[in-house]
Image (spheres, rainbow, N blue to C red):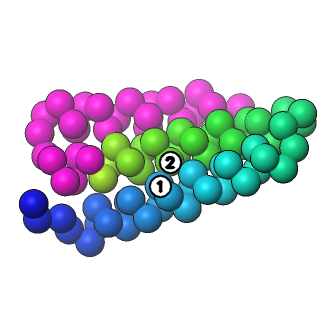
Amino acid sequence: MNIAISSLSALLAAIVTLSIGVSVLLRDRKQPAYRHFAALSFLISGWHVSQFINDAVPSGVTYWLSLLPGVAVPLAAQ
């Protein structure tokens, strides 16, 4: 498996974004702004993971699956 630098940076960005979302969610779950930010962070992390999978295993199916979290990001950014 030949993995490019861009796919590894997507994986690193997914890990960092996920950890930020978890830390914000653990800080205070009662405030709606924190919950919304955590949900947005999880969606962005999912988008980065799907980009990594698309780069690691390129096919038409992984390409279309990588677009789904990207479509959901504006819906979560209220």
The percent coordinates of residue 30 (x first, y second) are 89, 33
The residue identified by callout 2 is 45
The residue identified by callout 1 is 14
State the residue at coordinates (28%, 61%): 7
* Front one among 78 and 48: 48
Q: Mainly helix, strand or loop, the magenta region?
A: helix
- Which label is found at residue 67? none
Given the current orientation, which residue lies at the most extreme front position?
A: 26
* Front one among 47 and 16: 16
Do the numbered discs 2 and 1 sit on residues whose CB atoms are within 8 Å?
yes
Q: Is residue 52 left or right of residue 78?
A: left
Q: Is residue 49 left or right of residue 28?
A: left
**Would residue 40 be counted in the magenta stretch?**
no
Q: Quadrant of residue 60?
A: top left
Q: Which residues are magenta?
A: 53-78
Dot 2: within a 10 Å radius of its alpha carbon, few (fewer than 14), some, or many (20 or more) residues? many
Dot 1: within a 10 Å radius of its alpha carbon, few (fewer than 14), some, or many (20 or more) residues? many
Q: Is residue 9 left or right of residue 73?
A: left
Whether residue 20 can be seen here: yes
- Secondary element under disc 1, as helix, strand or loop, is helix
Mark 1 belongs to which amino acid?
Ala
Query: From mark 2 to mark 1, how far is it between C-alphas?
Result: 4 Å
- Secondary element under disc 2, as helix, strand or loop, is helix
Q: Quadrant of residue 16?
A: bottom right
The percent coordinates of residue 3 (x first, y second) are 18, 65
